[in-house]
Image: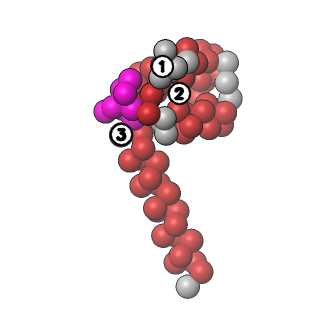
């Protein structure tokens, strides 16, 4: 079935569910457990949460992560608008 998450995508979602937020301990765990740099991890996480497969797999987590991302983007846009005006 093609509507399933890859093992890597599932691993990333499960990791994020276990270790929410940002911290240096989380960054170490990303490197140790997933063998990714934190920057690459967040790039992949951002892509994964935009998929319908991720939403189907863990709707509460994916909606929360999308909301956090969208709120951060709105704050950045607000700062940009303030500095331009």
Disc 2 crowd rating (10 Å Cα; few below 14, some 14-19, many 20+) is: some
Disc 1 crowd rating (10 Å Cα; few below 14, some 14-19, many 20+) is: few
Q: Nearer the viewer's eye, disc 3 or disc 1?
A: 1
Q: State the SS at label 2.
A: helix
Residue of label 3: 63
What segment carries the magenta color? 55-64
Give the residue drawn at x 38%, y 23%.
57
Q: State the SS at label 3.
A: helix
Give the residue drawn at x 59%, y 15%.
33
Q: Is residue 15 visible?
A: no
**What secondary structure do most residues of the magenta stretch adopt?**
helix
Vertical order, 4 against 69 (above or below): above
> Which quarter shows the C terminus?
bottom right
Q: Position of residue 13 (x, y in %)?
A: 47, 25
Furthest residue toward left: 60
Q: CA distance from mark 1 to mark 2?
A: 26 Å
Specify the label residue 4 is tagged with: 1
Furthest residue toward front: 1
Q: Position of residue 23 (x, y in %)?
A: 51, 34
| Mark earlier in primary sequence (3, 1) | 1
Disc 3 and disc 1 in contact, CB within 8 angstroms: no
62 in magenta: yes
Q: In front: 25, or 20?
A: 20
Give the residue drawn at x 42%, y 55%.
71
């Amino acid at each position: 079935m093609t509507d399933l998450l890859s093992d890597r995508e599932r691993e990333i979602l499960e990791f994020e569910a276990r270790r929410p937020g940002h911290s240096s301990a989380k960054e170490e765990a990303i490197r140790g457990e997933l063998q990714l740099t934190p920057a690459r991890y967040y790039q992949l996480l951002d892509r994964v949460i935009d998929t319908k497969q991720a939403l189907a797999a863990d709707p509460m987590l994916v909606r929360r992560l999308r909301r956090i991302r969208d709120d951060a983007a709105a704050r950045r846009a607000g700062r940009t608008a303030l500095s331009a005006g």
